[in-house]
Image: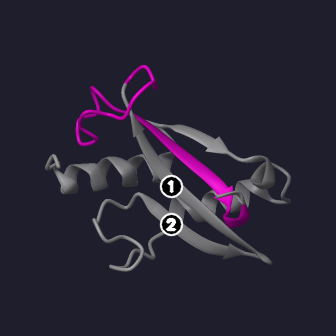
Amino acid sequence: MAEFNTDRIRELNDRARQSFTGCRVVITQGIQAMDNVSDLLDQVRWYDQFTPDNDPYQEHDFGSFRWGEVQVFWQFSYYDLDYSMHSPDPADETVTARVLTIMLAEEY
């Protein structure tokens, strides 16, 4: 398995999640149908509840929180620049297209 620069991946993920730049942001139909979507998106931006249980590789690539009565997940995926295969190195933004997907847990 290839070794990647975890600190750099975490830095890129945090920047993308906090600003919604440097990535594509995808919301599922379940999220789109909710009230106050902009407030929910702010919860993703401000998320800081990373623990060894939910972030074992310390990449800040996944989060989960309650939003009213539902559980919300968000996660990063790393693709090549054509979005056709996995990125060869998620720490290198010149070869990686990040996708941040925000979904209801039941849509996972």
Q: Is residue 77 above or below residue 80?
A: below
Q: Disc 2 versus disc 1: distance between alpha carbons?
A: 7 Å
Front residue of this view, candidates 46 and 107: 107
**Residue at x-position 62% and y-position 53%:** 102
Q: Is residue 95 magenta?
A: yes
The image quarter in which residue 69 lies:
bottom right
Instruction: Find residue 63 and name its label.
Output: 2
Instruction: Read off the magenta span.
Output: 81-106
Residue at image mark 1: 75
Secondary structure at badge 2 equals strand
Q: Main secondary structure of the magenta part?
A: loop
- Could you tell which of marks 2 and 1 lies nearer the N-terminus? 2
* Rendered location of residue 28, percent (x, y): 72, 47
Outermost residue to the top: 82
* Rendered location of residue 6, percent (x, y): 21, 55
The quarter of the rendered structure image containing the C terminus is bottom right
**Residue at x-position 36% and y-position 35%:** 86
Instruction: Find residue 29 and name its label.
Output: none
